[in-house]
Amino acid sequence: MPIEAKIQELNLELPAAPKPGGIYNPVVQVDDMLYVSGHGPIKLDGSMHTGRVGDDLTEEQGVEAARAVALTMLATLKQYLGDLNRIDRFVKVLGMVNAAPDFKRHPQVINGFSDLLVQIFGENGRAARSAVGMGSLPGNITVEVEAIVLLKKKEQTVL
């Protein structure tokens, strides 16, 4: 099933791809690998999920923010690639949680990101992953995630 059809089947909607907030590229391509800059949790109305998990927010709210990051990253990848079906698999993910000092369930929060990618891409959405807590994130966003993505090999035409 095409990826965009899968997103629709899950009743999901991609937000607008964010513009860079600094001097960086949202995606850098080297051969068939995409290195995706850290993305925040953008809501469909353009606002961000903000707050610290374990302090201002519950773990469940952190999971929702992580899901929003997955959709935001897919919006950027769609803008860059033109077609999400060009993605072979997610290789590596680093998830950062804006967390209270005593919060210990960072992996469970980042599962919101990973679970959604597995729903959309199947096992190719399951990446090697790190999930860490941060004392703060830019703009007090709840979660930031960066990723490395492998593109499908272009088919060779034999003459």
Image (cartoon, grey):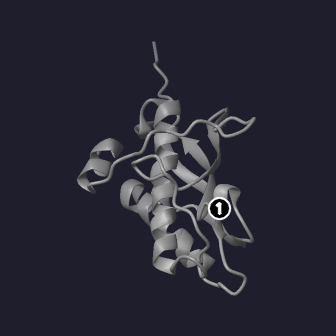
Circle count: 1
Please state the horizontal and vertical placement of residue 135, each as a whole percent of the image: 75, 71
Q: In which quarter of the image is residue 141?
A: bottom right
Left or right, 117 with reference to 56: left
Q: In which quarter of the image is residue 91?
A: bottom right
Identify the residue shown where x is 72% and y is 82%.
101
Identified at 47% across, 28% down, the residue is 155
104 horizontally vs 11: left or right: right
Q: Position of residue 109 (x, y in %)?
A: 54, 73
Q: Nearer the viewer, residue 89 or 141?
A: 141
- Residue 136: image quadrant is bottom right
Asked if residue 94 shows in the view, the reply is no
Residue that mark 1 sits on = 140
Quarter of the image for the C terminus: give it: top left
* Mark 1 residue element: helix
Frontmost residue, 61 versus 133: 61
Pick the residue in front: 107 or 17: 17
Q: Taking 143 as reference, is 104 above or below it?
A: below
Kindly identify the amino acid type of the residue bearing the numbered disc 1.
Answer: Asn
Residue at 27% in and 45% down: 5
How many residues crowd around disc 1 within 10 Å: few (fewer than 14), some, or many (20 or more)? some
Which residue is rendered at x = 56% and y = 63% of the image?
A: 50
Query: From this viewpoint, is residue 125 visible?
Result: yes
Up-down relation of residue 132 to residue 9 (above or below):
below
Percent coordinates x, y for residue 45 in the rendering: 40, 48
Spot occupied by residue 89 in the image (x, y as percentages of width and height): 51, 50
45 vs 150, nearest the viewer: 45
